[in-house]
Structures are given as C-alpha cells and as structure tokens.
Image (cartoon, grey):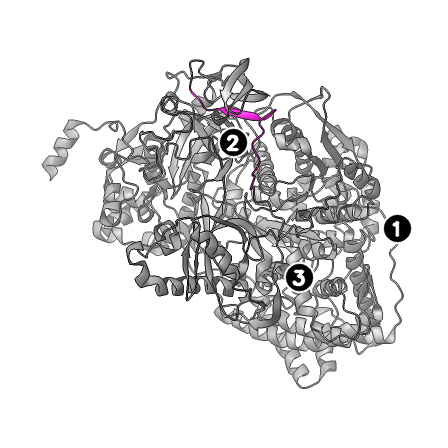
C-alpha cells in the first residue's frame, strides 16, 4: 500500500511523467513485470453493494476473468524479451502484522453486512468469494497458481508472439511479496555481466510503493503501467448497473520523474557534491516517514492539502545543511539521520496545526456516510490535536509530548519506567527504518523482525535519542519464512477459519491457548485515526501475535491428518521459467475441462532454484545480446524532457482546485524560426512533410498546417475541411478568418501547455500535426497510412523535427514487403471458394504472385430448427397483461431512485439511496438493452422530441415481460404509489422517498426495498449493457445454441498461386484495396479476425451483435475458446466472445465475396450498400411482435 496519495501528488507536481498507454504507445518494452494480486482483487470484487454477497461467482468464471485481464495487460504492453508473473507469497512478519490488521477490519465489515442479510432472510447459503482468500496458503491461491501455469502453456500454443518470449512465474507458494520478488529479479539482472543498460522495463502495479522502488533501482528505463483513475461520483447504488467498464491504462515514466527531480534539486546550494541518485535515495527514506507497509507513519505526516509542500521545503533545507547524505547503498548514516529528524521536528509542529484545521473542516462539512461511523473517533482525535497545538504554540513542547504519549501509548514520560519504554519505542522505530531500506535495496533482512508498537514516536524524541546514543550499523539475524498455514493462523480472523485445513481450526476455539487466557483473535478492538482523515489509514489495534506461542501451538497439530492437496498447500514451491521448444512436447492435463481438452504443448518448464544470480543468468543466456551501436539506438528509448533545451524551471501553485499543490514549471528554449523555411519549401512543392513531433513524446507524424502571425501554410494540398479542430471555419472565407484561426489554435495550444506545466516566452509558429495509428498495404508492395484513423494535435513549431530524437516505434517501413513463411489471409474470390482462408506463403513467383499453402476455413453447420429467435411483445399487450399503464412500464424500465434515509440520522442503514429500476432504457442517450427491448425502424441519430417519441413504440422481449411480471408481484406498494402519481407527474419524477411508499412502517419498507434490490441483482439479465437504439443482437439462448453447432475440419491444400495484393498480413489493419470496405455486417455473418487485438489472427467466428455506442462495434462468437476472449456480458460461455471494431474482422459471407469480383489490379471502384464510412449503419427492421391481435386494436379504438 505504501504512501497514500503519493501517485496523485507526484503526477500533479511533475505533469509530463504520466500519459495514456494504449496499443499504439510506441514504447518498445523488453521486460514486463506483473504484480498480479491487484488483478485478483479487481476481477473478484464488485463495487455494487451486496452483489458479492448475493451472487455466487463460479471459481472457473473468476479464473478466466483473472487470466483474461493478465492477457489484456500483456497484449497492450507487448514485451519483446521476458514476462515476469508473480503473486504475493508468505510475507515477512513485519508486513504480516499489517495484513492481519486489514483482514480483521475486512472481516468485521463482512460480518456486519451478513448480519443485515440474515435479518432480511437473504443470507446466501452457498459460499461466495471473499477477499481474504487472496492469501498465500489458501486453496484458492493454490489452484490459481495451477491456472496461471496452464494459461502460460496455452499462450505458447495459441499466441505466435510467445515464440520469442521467456515467461517466469513465481506463484504464491514462493515466499516474498510480489513487489519484492520483482525488485530482486531486476537487481539480479542489473548485476549480470551481460546486462544491457538500454533494456526497457515496465511494471504493472497500482501500489505507490512500486513508483518509489522503481526510482530506487536506478535503472535507465523503468516505467509503471496502471489503470487510469476514474472516481465514480454517483452515490446511488444501482441494482441493474448496465454501464460497460472500458479499462484504460496510463504509464508513469520514471525516467521523466528522475529528470524532473534533477531539474528541481540541482539548483539547491549544497555543501556536498550533488548526486541525483543519492538525492533520490534520501527522498525515498523521507517518504517512508509518511507511509510504508512495515511501520506506522509519523503523527500527522501525510500527502494532504499542501502539508507535503512543507515537508519538501524541509527536506531541501536539510540538503543545504547536511555534510553527508543520509543513505548509501541501502544503509543509513545515523549522523545525517539525526540532522534530518531535527529539521523534521519543526515540520511536525506545522503538520499538527495543519491537520487540526483539516479535521475541523471534515467533521463540519462531510456528508459521506462511509466515514460518519467514525465521527466519535474523529472528535476524540480533535481534542488531542487541539491540546497539542495549544501547547506547541506556547512553546510548551514538554507538556505537548507528555500529552501525546499518555493518550496514544499510555506511558508517562516523566517517570523512569516511561522514559525507558519510550527509548525502546524509538530504538525499535529506528531499526524499522533500516529494515525498510534494507528490504527494498538488498532483500528481506529478517523474516521474524517486526515493530511491536501501534504508534510512532515524535520527531523531537527521535532526535534527542540519536543525540544521546551512538548507533552502530543495525544488523538483523538469520531467519526463515513462516510456513503457509502458520502465516494464515497469524493473519486470518476466526471468521475465515474455513480457509485453513480442519486440523488447524481448533486453534481458533475459545479453549485454545491462542484465545485464553489472552485472546489473540478478539471480535472487538480499538480503532484509532491517529491523525488521519480516511478510514484505510486508521490503526486497528488488533493484538500482536505471540510468535513463540503461535509456533509452539502450530507444531502440536498432527500434520498426518492433512490430505494430499493440503500437504501440497503447506509446502513452499519454486519459480519456473517457461520457454518454447521444438520437441514433440508434453501432454498437459486441462484444468479448465469445460473450455479446453488435454493437449500436448511444445513448451518446457524449467525449475529455478531461488539463487537470484543463477536464476537471472538462466534467463539472460537465452537472450541474443547485440551491441547496438548505430545512431538511432543511441537515442533515448523512452520519452524524455531533455530532447529539447530547457532554459529554467520553477515551482508554482496550481490554479485549479488543487491550489495548495505545486507544479514544476518548465521553460523551453525557442527554436530558430529558420526551420519554418524548410517547411515552406515542402509547401511550395505540394509535398507532405513527414517529421517527428511532440514533447516529451516524439512520434512520427505529418504536418498538415503551419500558421504564424505572418504565414499560413497548408501542406500536401490540405484544406480547412480536412482539419477537425478548424471545422467551424470555411475555406471560401479563409483570408478573412486567418487571424481568428491563429487565435483559436493558440488558445488550444496554450491550454495544453498549461496542463503540461510548460512555458514558452513567445510562440513563433503553430503546427497542426497528424499522427497515424494504422498501416495499409498498397498493391505496389509499399506501405501507406490509414487516413481514416488519425489523431490530430496542435503544437508549437519547437516540437517538430525532421530528425528522429527519441527511439519510439513509429511503424514507418520503406522496404518492400517480404511474405515468405508469413501467415496470411486470402481475400480474393474464385471458384475454389477459399476467400477468408488461412495460408502460409511458401515461395516467391514474381513481383506480384506467391505460392501459398491453404488451410480451408471451417464451415459452421447450423441447425436452424434448434435456434429459436426470441419473441417480442407490443407494449400495449404487456400493459393489458400486467394491468398497469404503458407510462408506468416505461418508468419501471428506466431509473427508479429510492431515497432510504440520511445516515447522519440513521446510522443502521447501509446506503442512503438505491436505484431499483431495470435501467433497460436511457431515453436521453437514445439507448436501450437490445436483448430486452427493440424499436422498429429506430433512428440512432434522432434528436429532441423525436428521440423520446420513438420509445413509445418499444417492444418487450419475452424474458423482460416475465421479469416485469415478477417485479410487480414483489413490490406492489411501489405500483400503487406510481398509479397515484399520475401520468404527467410521472414523467418528471426523479426521486422517491421511502416514506412516500411506506408511510406506516418505514423500517419494514426499507427491508422490503433491500430484498427487492437484491432480487434485481440476481437476475441474469441485470448486467446486460445499454446500447444505441439501432443496435441488434442475438439473444443469449440463440448464442448458446450457436455454440453447440458442429464445425467441419479445415482441409490442407498446397500450390495455390495468388497475387500479392490479395494476401493480408497481421501487422496491417485492413485487407489490401479495402480502405473503404463495407460498414455493414449482418447477424449470422461468418467473419475472420484480421489482427490479434481480441483473439488470434485468422480466428473464425460468427456475428451475434451489432452495437452502436457512438462507434460501431461488432459482437463475435468465435468458433474456439481462447484466452483474451470474453463472455459478452454473460451471454455466451467464457472465452468464446469478443466485441471488436469493424476493421478488426473480414466478412467472408457470400455478400462480400461478390463485391470482391469488382476489384482488378488495384481498382477501388465499387457501389454497394454501406461501402463507405459516410453511409448510415442501418435502421433495424423486425418481424411483427407477438400477440398483436385485431380485437385489441379495436378495443383501443373504442377507448379512444
């Protein structure tokens, strides 16, 4: 967990260190490290309240979700040499204490919710997944280890890029935290003789520790990839939450962080030689005072509301005074440490004053119910802070310190016994500092050492102790890790006893020496904010386990009672290296039998022995080390601040809501404007000007427009209509609006510069640049860029160069294409009916033709009798059947926000507001759930009144009608209320109070609504996503029927001669001559994958959905399961479906094959429905709904 808020603070202070990380990021990553525990938490938990308690998630579904997420990260990063996968193993005792606190707190909250569900008769009988299972030694983690090994075998078999990779897996049976194992491996690589300093490293982790530790490893190119932070501001708990989570990633470039720090700290006037690496090491030690996983933070030290700015100023003051750095190679210089703590003691007083202000504001203003439970603790903390602040303000530090230790540590520092106890606290805390530093710079110094107090001493007392005592180099004795089951006994509360084998559960009995006479597993314990605002920073005062007693009782357990699986779980394992082999391979038993059969895999598994030098040598000896001396490879391999000259830097307060946060501003030097003459020469020749653009990223792009106060240059015959950012201006009045265009571009650019913390004294010229994401292949065997997929940016001329200055991958290839031994897709149409088939190029015939070996595409033998299309009903029929008006049905299908109560007044409620609507329509966004509703001839681009009007024609699916019928039976009180509201008021009804529905017995009403909420949660259809009204999908029943259809085997056939431009390679994004290929797919069409974004290149599938959410996406049911494929929101089996972009697939049904006949030698002339990007997608037209009888129409007419 490390330092809370460190990541947010760092990315605001150094804004260019963070940027989005996508498939086309351009970074070449050699080594990828995944700290995978976070992946488990992300896939196993759900933010919707009660969902984890009410819906039993199959372990197999959870496994596939975890492995798919791992696959997603690997595909985005695309490492070239090594993948290192790791789970947390048994942790040192110092970390285990923190794990113990967290698991006890988690168990307490879990028990509270379970008690509530029991009161409502909603207790789930089947065991649902609980987070405390994510611990080394549990059955879940043991099985997950086996799943990851199987995943690695499958990826070597399914994914061709693994042929050049080595994969290391260190499971939860290998001792050590995941981050520690990663750092140890990186240190091992760095110490090898054949280490290449230009190798690039990327670590996946959301833990702020990894940012600091990545800086401390002092490698040239290290980056962190993590999910982009997106806070959900909606406090309403939604039962049918239909938003699709699109995970986006961002990269923290630690090379840029180091460059920023160098710019900031090199200006300090120091008495000792300046060394940025030594400054960083001391900086990291300073931040360990704010938070780490082994010691409590110093009182009121944290990154909050500008407090950290005072801390940084204090650190700079120390650097000006010190005669030596505090740390060297992971060891503390205690003389310098004394000076650092001395200057920090002044900061400590300011931090207490600052925290007092914050806590007063928090208690007064907060309305967040999650923290109101701790209001009593906050008010108690406020009294202590207030008293401390008064005493420090009056220079009565002795009184203030006495008050602090009496309240927090229950010791009297005026007594001799109290002073001795304080000295013990301080000595242990100093040992802890050395422990933390040694842990991250050398490895685990001790598996048994831990800090045996809940609180840290004050800086004043640490300084006094160091002045009185001469501390020698602190060493830690040899020790070994706890056994897996022994650690589970150490950290798990009694509530989770079932995670241990039966023989060990007796130690949780009340008669156990671990429970009596002293209870090490209490149900109740004190929680202390310790100067913190947020709950996760509070101290849970769970008793420290007696190590000797635990070891003694553990040894008494009869291990012979364990079954074979439990015996395996009790043992430590090894890390393994997986590499491809050309041998026949070994038969591996499938551990996902419902998805994969047993198979032979051409992969060998090499056991690593745990000696890091030998293990890393085993890996590096398989890498072909090449001395890259050419000019291009001497360039920076990551974006860099130093690619442009920096005049000066300064710190400035941010102007937004983070006004107490400082940002390091960078002033860039001006470039010689003569460069503009070079661009003008290209403009005169009507040529395109290709260049390297951007800062600090520097990508290959194309200049479209350059403007200044005196010049206005279009390149390559561009016009205003081609430039999106200038779409509001017209070409025919260009001369009249040139000044407006310049001002518009200047404002856009200056906004961006402000966000990046960049200052330019003057702007000479502004450029509009195109960055192309995709390559096309031309019929003359050359490459070009896809003009339809482009990113447009505005930047100063200073950021443009005709020379490459950062070695990022730009995909610019000027050589002719070599297809020999390449896998291709045939996209021609001939009598042999091989369009869409996979082939391997065997021989070159001439400039246009090759001989290829063809593997015919499999045919899907669909039994239409077994595939039943879903029935839909007119809303008037449903209205009559349920005896409620169409208006009420529409209301039930949308949002229904029920206000439960104010948690400030009703502390026993778990949520203030719930949404118990189906959320199957969103009229404002023109969306519906296509499997539940449909609109005949819906217009996806309708606006205003017409957009709302077309929902009146909605037809309801059979499954939705059944759910509505059950809804009305379960909550008749709501229906009665809605009928009383009236049609007109119903349209504007945004929120319903619980007291409006249940006036006589509100508590009973709350229980009924909670039951109803949990019923909605358990509906299989509750998570089907919203899509534009023009979307179409097969029902889940139809998709399941399609999964059962038989496939013919692919037949091999050789010696087909094909023209070059009719063969499609994976690295390109659309087939040759298909730069404008059709924008229409139809349900049931057969398709083949054109790349490996979502599945394997050349995989076959069938279209089962056409989704429009602002961009047309195609749902495909693939013929074969593969990791990386999904379950389409539960509508198909795991690993069978994907939602892909239009250009990711090629349609091989008869409709497209006929159009291919129009091609000849590169011609693009064709006229067919939807062939261009400007064509409307479709207007859905359906068969008539069920049960719309004439007599019903007559009845309606009579009523009218």
Q: Against 906, is 1134 above or below?
A: above
Near-viewer residue (1056 or 935): 1056
Q: In this view, does 542 lie to the left or right of 414?
A: left
Extreme residue toward the bottom, this view: 394
Verify CB contact (< 8 Å) between mark 3 and mark 1.
Answer: no
Q: What stretch is highlighted in magenta?
A: 812-829
| Image coordinates for residue 16, horizontal then vertical, percent | 58, 59
Q: Distance between the residues labelled 3 and 2?
A: 43 Å
The image quadrant that residue 1074 belongs to is top left
Residue 818 painted magenta: yes
Residue 1035 badge: none
Residue 989 painted magenta: no
- Observer able to see residue 693: yes
- Observer able to see residue 519: no
Mark 3 is surrounded, within 10 Å at the Cα level, by few (under 14), some (14 to 19) or many (20 or more) other residues, namely some
Viewer-nearest of labels 3 and 1?
A: 3
Q: Mark 2 points at which residue?
A: 781
Magenta-highlighted stretch: main secondary structure? loop
Of pointers 3 and 2, the one earlier in the residue sequence: 3
| Image coordinates for residue 468, horizontal then vertical, percent | 87, 76
Q: Mark 1 points at which residue?
A: 478
Verify CB contact (< 8 Å) between mark 3 and mark 2.
Answer: no
Q: Mark 3 points at which residue?
A: 259
| Image coordinates for residue 1133, horizontal then vertical, percent | 50, 28
Tag 3's secondary structure? helix
Q: How far apart are marks 1 and 2 (CA)?
A: 65 Å
Q: Is residue 560 left or right of residue 1077?
A: right
């Amino acid at each position: 967990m490390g330092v809370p808020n460190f990541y947010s603070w760092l990315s605001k202070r150094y804004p260019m260190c963070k940027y989005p990380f996508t498939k086309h990021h351009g970074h070449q990553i050699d080594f990828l490290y995944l700290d995978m525990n976070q992946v488990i938490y992300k896939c196993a938990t759900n933010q919707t309240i009660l969902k984890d308690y009410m819906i039993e998630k199959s372990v197999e579904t959870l496994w596939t979700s975890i492995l798919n997420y791992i696959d997603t990260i690997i595909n985005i990063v695309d490492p070239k040499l090594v993948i290192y996968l790791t789970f947390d193993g048994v942790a040192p005792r110092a970390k285990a204490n923190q794990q113990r606190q967290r698991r006890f707190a988690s168990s307490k909250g879990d028990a509270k919710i379970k008690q509530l569900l029991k009161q409502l008769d909603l207790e789930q009988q089947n065991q649902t997944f609980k987070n405390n299972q994510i611990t080394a030694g549990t059955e879940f983690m043991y099985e997950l280890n086996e799943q990851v090994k199987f995943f690695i075998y499958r990826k070597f078999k399914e994914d061709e890029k693994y042929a050049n990779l080595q994969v290391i897996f260190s499971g939860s049976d290998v001792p050590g935290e995941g981050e520690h194992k990663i750092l140890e491996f990186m240190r091992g690589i760095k110490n090898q003789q054949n280490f290449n300093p230009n190798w690039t490293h990327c670590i996946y982790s959301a833990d702020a520790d990894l940012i600091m530790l990545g800086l401390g490893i002092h490698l040239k190119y290290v980056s962190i990839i993590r999910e982009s932070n997106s806070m959900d501001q909606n406090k309403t708990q939604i039962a049918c939450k239909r938003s699709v989570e699109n995970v986006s990633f961002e990269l923290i470039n630690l090379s840029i962080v180091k460059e920023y720090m160098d710019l900031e700290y090199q200006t300090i006037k120091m008495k000792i030689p300046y060394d940025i690496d030594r400054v960083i090491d001391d900086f990291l030690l300073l931040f360990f005072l704010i938070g780490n996983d082994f010691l409590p933070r110093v009182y009121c030290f944290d990154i909050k509301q500008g407090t950290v700015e005072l801390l940084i100023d204090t650190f700079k003051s120390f650097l000006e005074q010190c005669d030596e750095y505090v740390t060297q190679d992971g060891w503390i210089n205690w003389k310098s440490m004394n000076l650092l703590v001395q200057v920090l003691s002044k900061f400590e007083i300011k931090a207490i004053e600052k925290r007092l202000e914050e806590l007063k504001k928090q208690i007064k203003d907060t309305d967040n119910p999650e923290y109101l439970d701790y209001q009593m603790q906050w008010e108690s903390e406020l009294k202590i802070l207030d008293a401390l602040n008064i005493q420090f303000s009056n220079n009565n530090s002795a009184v203030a310190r006495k008050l602090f230790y009496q309240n927090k540590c229950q010791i009297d520092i005026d007594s001799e016994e109290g002073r001795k106890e304080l000295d013990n606290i301080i000595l242990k805390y100093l040992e802890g500092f050395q422990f933390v530093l040694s842990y991250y710079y050398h490895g685990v110094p001790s598996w048994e050492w831990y800090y045996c107090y809940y609180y840290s001493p004050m800086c004043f007392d640490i300084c006094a102790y160091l002045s009185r005592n001469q501390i020698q180099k602190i060493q830690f004795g040899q020790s070994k890790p706890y056994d897996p089951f022994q650690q589970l006994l150490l950290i798990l509360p009694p509530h989770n006893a079932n995670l241990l084998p039966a023989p060990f559960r007796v130690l949780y009995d009340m008669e156990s020496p671990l429970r009596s006479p002293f209870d090490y597993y209490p149900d109740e314990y004190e929680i202390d904010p310790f100067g913190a605002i947020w709950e996760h920073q509070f101290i849970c005062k769970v008793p420290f386990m007696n190590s000797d007693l635990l070891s003694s009782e553990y040894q008494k357990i009869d291990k012979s009672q364990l079954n074979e699986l439990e015996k395996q779980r009790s043992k430590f394992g090894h890390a393994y290296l997986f590499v491809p082999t050309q041998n026949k391979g070994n038969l591996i038993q499938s551990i996902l039998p419902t998805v994969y059969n047993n198979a032979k895999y051409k992969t060998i598994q090499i056991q690593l022995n745990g000696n890091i030098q030998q293990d890393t040598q085993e890996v590096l000896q398989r890498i072909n080390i090449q001395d890259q001396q050419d000019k291009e490879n001497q360039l920076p391999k990551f974006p860099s601040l130093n690619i442009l000259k920096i005049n000066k830097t300064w710190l400035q307060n941010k102007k937004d809501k983070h006004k107490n946060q400082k940002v390091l501003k960078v002033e860039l030097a001006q470039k010689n404007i003569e460069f503009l003459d070079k661009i003008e020469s290209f403009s005169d020749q009507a040529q395109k000007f290709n260049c390297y653009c951007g800062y600090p990223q520097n990508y290959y792009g194309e200049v479209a427009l350059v403007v200044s106060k005196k010049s206005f240059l279009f390149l390559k015959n561009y016009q205003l209509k081609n430039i999106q950012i200038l779409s509001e201006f017209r070409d025919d009045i260009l001369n009249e609006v040139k000044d407006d265009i310049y001002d518009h571009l200047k404002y856009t650019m200056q906004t961006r510069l402000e966000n990046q913390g960049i200052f330019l004294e003057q702007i000479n010229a502004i450029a509009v640049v195109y960055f192309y994401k995709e390559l096309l292949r031309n019929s003359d065997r050359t490459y070009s860029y896809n003009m339809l997929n482009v990113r447009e940016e505005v930047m100063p001329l200073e950021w443009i160069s005709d020379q490459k200055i950062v070695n990022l991958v730009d995909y610019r290839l000027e050589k002719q294409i070599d297809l020999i031994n390449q896998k291709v897709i045939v996209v021609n149409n001939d009598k042999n009916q091989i369009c869409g088939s996979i082939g391997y190029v065997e021989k070159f015939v001439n400039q246009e033709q090759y001989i290829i070996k063809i593997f015919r595409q499999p045919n899907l033998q669909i039994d239409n009798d077994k595939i039943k299309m879903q029935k839909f009903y007119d809303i008037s029929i449903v209205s009559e059947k349920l005896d409620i008006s169409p208006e009420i049905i529409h209301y039930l299908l949308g949002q229904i926000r029920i206000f439960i109560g104010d948690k400030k007044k009703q502390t026993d409620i778990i949520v203030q507001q719930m949404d118990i609507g189906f959320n199957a329509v969103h009229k404002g966004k023109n969306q519906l759930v296509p499997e539940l509703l449909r609109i005949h001839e819906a217009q996806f681009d309708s606006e205003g009144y017409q957009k709302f009007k077309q929902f009146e024609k909605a037809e309801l699916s059979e499954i939705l009608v059944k759910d509505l019928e059950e809804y009305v039976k379960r909550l008749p009180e709501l229906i009665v209320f809605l009928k009383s509201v009236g049609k007109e008021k119903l349209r504007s009804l945004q929120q319903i109070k619980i007291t409006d529905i249940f006036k006589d017995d509100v508590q009973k009403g709350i229980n009924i609504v909670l039951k109803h909420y949990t019923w909605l949660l358990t509906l299989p259809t509750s998570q089907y996503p919203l899509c534009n009204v023009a979307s179409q999908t097969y029902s889940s029943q139809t998709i399941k029927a399609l999964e059962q259809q038989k496939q013919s085997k692919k037949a091999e056939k050789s010696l087909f001669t094909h023209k070059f431009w009719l063969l499609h390679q994976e690295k390109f994004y659309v087939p040759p001559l298909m730069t404008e290929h059709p924008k229409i797919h139809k349900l049931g069409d057969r398709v083949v994958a054109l790349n490996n974004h979502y599945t394997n290149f050349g995989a076959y599938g069938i279209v089962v959905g056409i989704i429009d959410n602002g961009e047309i996406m195609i749902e495909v049911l693939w013929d074969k399961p593969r990791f990386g494929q999904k379950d389409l929101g539960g509508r198909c089996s795991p690993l069978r479906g994907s939602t892909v972009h239009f250009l990711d697939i090629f349609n091989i049904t008869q409709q497209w094959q006929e159009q291919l006949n129009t091609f000849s030698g590169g011609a693009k002339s064709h006229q067919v429905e939807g062939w261009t990007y400007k064509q409307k997608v479709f207007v859905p037209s359906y068969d008539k709904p069920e049960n719309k009888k004439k007599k019903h129409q007559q009845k309606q007419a009579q009523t009218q």
